[in-house]
Image (tube, helix red, strand yellow):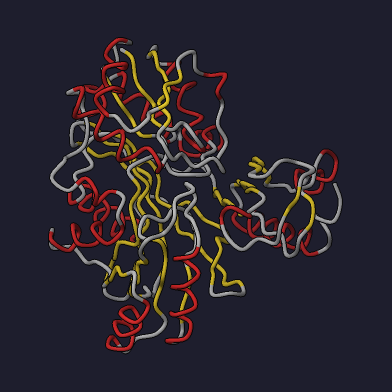
Amino acid sequence: MTCAIVDAYGAGRLLPAALRRYGVEFLHVRSEFPDTYLEYRPEDFSVDIAHKGDVEATAAELRRHGVDHVVAAAESGVLLANELSVALGTPGNGMRRPEARRNKLQMQRAVRDAGLASADSLVSASADEVVAWAVDRGEWPVILKPVASAGTDNVLICDSADDVRAAHARILSGTDRYGRGNGTVLAQRFLVGEEHYVNTVSRNGVHRIVEIWHYFKRPVPGGRSINDYEILLPPDDPEARQIGDYTLDVLDALEIRNGAAHTEVMLTKDGPVLIECGARLGGGQMPDVLSRCIGTDQVDRLAFSIAHPEEFSGGSQEPYRPRTHLRCVNLISPHDGTVPSGARWDPVRALPSFAALVPNLPEGGPAPRTVDLATCPGAVYLSSHDATQVEADCARLRELERDGLYDGG
């Protein structure tokens, strides 16, 4: 078996090693607009194919290499992976509304059409139209973001018509994480509740939940919010069961039948509502840590589903079971500084529940004030059988950041 990995950036860089463990050969396909902010390991690939816009030409090259499976590893590869799967006749996702897996307006409409709760949304290049929509709704704040946003890229909270105009102008004048201009702006109802995300793997329409996290954000100046920390929920938690059932219905609504998915859901007072769903691996993966905590991880499950589809899909499988309390704390630089290196990380690694450090930015390089995912220096995983220890270490980590963690190299 030979698998084509489309855009092995970010968490996707971990997939080659997992496929190798299961005896699956692989090659790389680069889409026209990959997210170059994310880490990539070119040394993992003996074949690296640059897609230049001609699906049939790329598919023909994949046939020459004997490719019989295509998988999207990063958000930028979702649509191309769909098209290549169709061209090759390999297992893929439904193609009635493929754009619904990238375009956030179409995504909400597909979910709504399936009878599921969705967020009221509008897409427009006109600031006047967006202001009129927001005023007519009479509910503030509202969210503005690029229609095919990724991470927290230009996701802005607006409390007034003036905020909407400023945010609209900012988004239209900028580019997305893939270097493309924003021709329109997505306006969306501001969802109030508890935010969660679910990482899953699907094969032939059978879905497996790998993990459910409850995550928390904090506001920053300029109408933005940033990820603060996330906690792993046990599958029998009442919130987790409700979120998990809704997520499986969302996967069906979006025709995600094969591959990984990362689904963000708000648990409101009226029940779960989709924020957005990415038909690819979740970001910020730390497979070693998660495997120690629950016995598996999304990257491994994706590789297993490709190598052993019948075993993955057949029969019942036990849900994941957390063995420890696990928290992912997103690093936050309170001002422009420097990413720590060497011994400057020692106080962090000395935390009793320290499990792993995942840098997003080069050590010793600039650490701009954290305002979004792209300026987040990294993440620290904390794991312990004692929940109070995890809580105390999280507080201590924030103290270290306030007291000069980013003030030297």
Residue 173: percent from left, percent from top: 49, 65
Q: Nearer the viewer, residue 99 or 398?
A: 99
Compared across the picture, whether 205 is left or right of 247 comes to: left
Residue 250: percent from left, percent from top: 23, 53
Compared across the picture, whether 379 is left or right of 81 comes to: right
Q: Nearer the viewer, residue 394 or 335?
A: 335
Quadrant in the picture for residue 42:
top right
For image coordinates 39% across by 13% down, the residue present is 25
For image coordinates 76% across by 60% down, the residue present is 336
Compared across the picture, whether 2 is left or right of 100 comes to: right
Quadrant in the picture for residue 364:
top right
Residue 214: percent from left, percent from top: 45, 58
Q: How many marks?
A: 0
Quadrant in the picture for residue 279:
top left
For image coordinates 63% across by 55% down, the residue present is 375
Residue 43: percent from left, percent from top: 57, 19
| Vertical comparison of 260 with 399: above or below | above
For image coordinates 57% across by 43% down, the residue present is 37
Quarter in which the N terminus is drawn: top left
